Every structure is written in structure tokens, then in C-alpha cells.
Amino acid sequence: MKTRVVVVLALVLALCTTAFAADAKAPTKLKKVESQNVCMITEHHMGKAQVPVTVDGKTYYGCCEMCKKQLAEDASKRKAKDALTGEEIDKATAVIGADDDGKVYYFASEKNLDAYNAKIK
């Protein structure tokens, strides 16, 4: 009886895993986007100009007053990891790429964005 239950559970798990994998989207190449069209808190390309926030002479962007406040008050929100190298970079000077769903990725240079895209098949 126990063996039968284990086999059934294993089959159910295998089916669920296969269904989940089928739903997962393959990564797509990123399109370079302008920073002023990105909410740097939600990490999303909004397709239109966002609210500028100037801190120490650098400009960041948020989609609302809450995001604007976070960018102004929390220095960690103004930093990102380069999606290719993992290097910490400043969002105000980053090259930004967006996927088909609008999720953004930050890069230290356009060369890094190009190298990231080259890895996607």
C-alpha cells in the first residue's frame, strides 16, 4: 500500500513539474529603454515619462509619490546589480534593458547589455 501511494505521489509531482515547466517563458532578448520611462522601484518599463527624483546631482525615476520618496530617502533603492556581471551599479547611470513583459534589468554599459543578449538563444 505504501509503495502504491509513493508511486502515485511521484507521478503527480512529475505531472505538476512538467506542467509548470511548460508554462515557464523562455528568456527573451532585452530592448534598451530610456531611464526616464522606468519606475526604478517597481523595476518596470512604463512606456512613458516617470516622476524624476534628483539626489546628489543624479536623476532617478519613480511612478508615484511613494516611489519618489523611497528613491529620495533610501540609497539602496538607487543601486542595482549588473544583470551580466553582478557588479553593483548606480541606476541613474545604468544602461537599462526591458524584456517583453516590461521587467527591467540594469547594466554598467551597453557592452554588457549586448553580451547578456548574446547569451539568449
Image (cartoon, grey):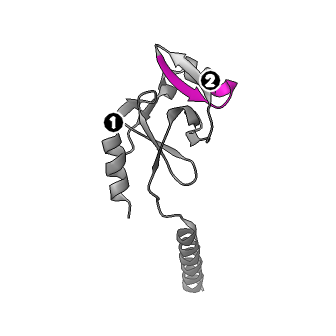
Seen in the image, is 114 located left or right of residue 66?
left
Taking the spot 54% from the left edge, 83% from the top edge, the residue there is: 7
Q: Which residue is tagged 2?
A: 68
Q: Which mark identifies residue 106? A: none
Seen in the image, is 10 located left or right of residue 84?
right
Q: Residues within 10 Å of mark 1 (few under 14, many from 20)?
A: few
Q: Residue furthest right?
A: 65
Please name the amino acid that badge 2 sits on.
Lys
Q: Is residue 92 visible?
A: yes
Please name the amino acid that badge 1 sits on.
Glu
- The image quadrant of residue 15 is bottom right
Q: Nearer the viewer, residue 33 or 104?
A: 33
Quick check: is 79 in the magenta stretch? no
Q: Which residue is tagged 1?
A: 87
| Quadrant position of the C terminus in the picture | bottom left
Q: Earlier in the sequence, mark 1 or mark 2?
A: 2
Return the x and y of residue 112 as percentages of the image width and height: 32, 44
The residue stretch that appears in magenta = 58-67
Seen in the image, is 9 located left or right of residue 119?
right
Taking the spot 57% from the left edge, 36% from the top edge, the residue there is: 37
Q: Compute the Cα span from label 1 to label 2.
A: 24 Å
